[in-house]
Image (cartoon, rainbow, N blue to C red):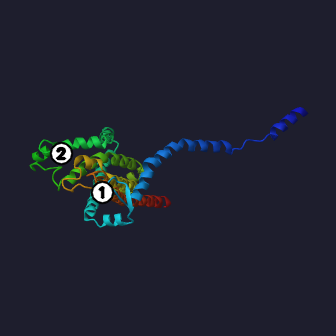
Amino acid sequence: MTSVTNAVTKEAQKPVPAAGGTKERSEWWAWVLLLPVIALFFLFNFFPFLRAIYLSFTQTDLFGQPAAFAGLSQYIDTLSDPHFLATLGRTLLFTVLSVVFKLVIGMAIALPLSYRIRGTVWMRSIVLVPMAVSTAVGTLVFSQMFAPAVGFFDQVARALGFGQVGWLTSPQVALFSVLIVDVWIGISFVILLMLVAIDQIPGEQIEAAALDGATGWRYVRHIIIPGIAPMLFVLTVTQAMSAMKEFTIFNVLTGGGPGDSTRTLVLDIYDLAFGGGTADFAAASARGMVLVFFIAVLTAAQFWLSNRGKAK
């Protein structure tokens, strides 16, 4: 009995491995596995951003290499350039129109699809089809539909008595044509998130509204819009960012023309850096930082309002 007791006592006196050893080893392996991702992020995202900031304070040569430090002169020249101000105003106009059209049309489609009646499941699937189409492919299809005389839209316009419109050749219509494509490509995402938000509205509120006789616009105004207000704000911010950065649709459809009627800030940055053989990376970087500023303001507003909502 004594020998058994002594064995148990010796076993109990053995040092116990530190509990944190396994945890520290796991954290070390996690960082090792994350290193390739961190390196790629720095190489393809963070480093180009830092270089763009640096270039925006320089003068670049014909090959796009920094030749001299210029201080704030690139920003001063950019913000005092009437061409840039017109481009910025056009970009903001397109952004506002894109967000408004997507939210209004998305609400008009999502609300009927939120009812649990026969056929809505299939309709939900149909309206989400644009999400499966890449922006480049969808834009190429629309470019054929906008073709003069033989295109689908011109044929519809002639059938309605409007004649040939010049969807991509008229300075007064071209921006609206780009807006049509942008709304069609992005509307599915808006509808999907709106449907999710509407489904989260408590059934008690909907039943109480029905008992109170809230129908039509009153139902939308007092039940639906307040119920999905956080999602509406998220969609406003994300779609505004998307519209500000839109490049593919403009480049494929119009290239900024006719004239400068569809030239936006992103196209201006691209042309300064890579178009016309100028390689003016300094001016392009300064304009890029202006774009980053607007996106940062939208992001900060989103975080501030979301944190304010959580605090309440």
Q: Horizontal and vertical percent for residue 26?
A: 61, 42
Q: Horizontal and vertical percent for residue 276?
A: 25, 52
* Front-lying residue, 294 or 116: 294
Mark drawn on residue 209: none
Task: Report the mark closest to the observer, 2 or 1.
Answer: 1
* Front-lying residue, 137 or 86: 86
Mark drawn on residue 265: 1
Which residue sits at x=50%, y=42%?
36
Mark drawn on residue 146: 2
Label count reads 2
Which residue sits at x=38%, y=64%?
70
Give the farthest residue toward the right.
2
* Front-lying residue, 210 or 276: 276
Residue type beneath disc 2: Phe
Q: Is residue 295 visible?
A: no
Residue type beneath disc 1: Leu
* 33 on left or right of 111: right
Q: How crowded is mark 2: few (under 14 residues within 10 Å), some or many (20 or more)?
A: many
Which residue sits at x=25%, y=46%?
252
Circles 2 and 1 in contact, beta carbons < 8 Å: no
* 122 on left or right of 15: left
Q: Is residue 217 above or below residue 137?
A: below
Q: Horizontal and vertical percent for residue 196?
A: 39, 47
Q: Can residue 257 be seen in this view?
A: yes
As measured in the structure, the alpha-carbon distance from the residue carrying label 2 to the one carrying label 1 is: 24 Å
Quarter of the image where the N terminus is located: top right
